[in-house]
């Protein structure tokens, strides 16, 4: 299944949660996304956001901050907790226009709690 949210003017929509059973066809999600896009276009929507691809696009920086290095490490080695690379690869099939998104939190402990909550939400382990 795929959930989506719309603006009050019904001109833009954003993909929310997407899930499939392990035994589903390997093309099930492509089919759902395509059908969703066609449905929204027919209904008069002008824009569909596929949502974010956490930690993707984290390239090497000349003088990276500790948080940048941490994010890059999560992108490279965080696959055992969440398939960040797979999500980016899946969404890339639709040739989206990627825009950077940033996260702000106060205090070092607040950052870890926020990142943990986001990981649980993205992974479907928390509601």
Image: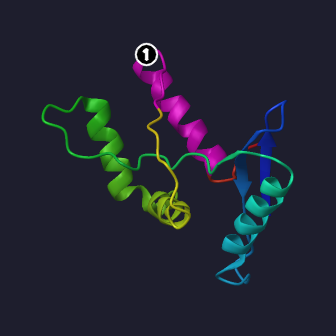
Residue 11 image point, x, y percent? 77, 39
Q: Is residue 83 above or below residue 20?
A: above
Q: Is residue 126 magenta?
A: no
Rendered residue at 54%/66% (across/down) = 90
Residue 86 image point, x, y percent? 49, 65
Which corner quadrant holds the C terminus? top right
Among the 4 quarters of the image, the one containing residue 37: bottom right
Rendered residue at 48%/46% (across/down) = 54
Rendered residue at 78%/67% (across/down) = 35
Residue 122 image point, x, y percent? 62, 48
Q: Is residue 119 above or below residue 67?
A: below
Judging depth in this view, the residue of 39 and 60 nearest the camera is 39
Give the residue pinned by disc 1: 107
Q: Crowdedness of circle 1 by 10 Å Cα count: few (<14), some, many (20+)? A: few
Among the 4 quarters of the image, the one containing residue 20: bottom right
Judging depth in this view, the residue of 3 and 112 nearest the camera is 3
Picture mark count: 1
Rendered residue at 71%/67% (across/down) = 34
First to last magenta residue range:
102-122
Q: Is residue 107 magenta?
A: yes
Q: Which residue in the rendered view is the most extreme toward the top? A: 106
User: Does residue 25 appear to the left or right of 39 in the view shown?
Assistant: left
Provide the secondary structure element on which disc 1 rests. loop
Which corner quadrant holds the N terminus? bottom right
Q: How is the image coloured?
A: rainbow
User: Does residue 100 appear to the left or right of 31 in the view shown?
Assistant: left
Secondary structure predominantly adopted by residues drawn in magenta: helix
User: Does residue 86 appear to the left or right of 76 in the view shown?
Assistant: right
Residue 80 image point, x, y percent? 46, 62
Q: Is residue 50 above or below residue 19?
A: above
């Amino acid at each position: 299944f795929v959930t989506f949210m719309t603006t009050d003017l019904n001109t833009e929509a954003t993909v929310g949660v997407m899930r499939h059973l392990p035994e589903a066809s390997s093309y099930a999600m492509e089919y759902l996304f395509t059908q969703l896009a066609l449905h929204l276009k027919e209904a008069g929507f002008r824009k569909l956001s596929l949502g974010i691809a956490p930690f993707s696009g984290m390239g090497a920086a000349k003088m990276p901050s500790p948080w940048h290095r941490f994010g890059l490490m999560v992108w490279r080695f965080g696959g055992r907790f969440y398939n960040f690379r797979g999500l980016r690869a899946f969404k890339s099939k639709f040739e989206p226009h990627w825009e950077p998104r940033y996260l702000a939190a106060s205090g070092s402990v607040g950052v870890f709690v926020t990142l943990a909550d986001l990981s649980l939400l993205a992974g479907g382990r928390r509601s």
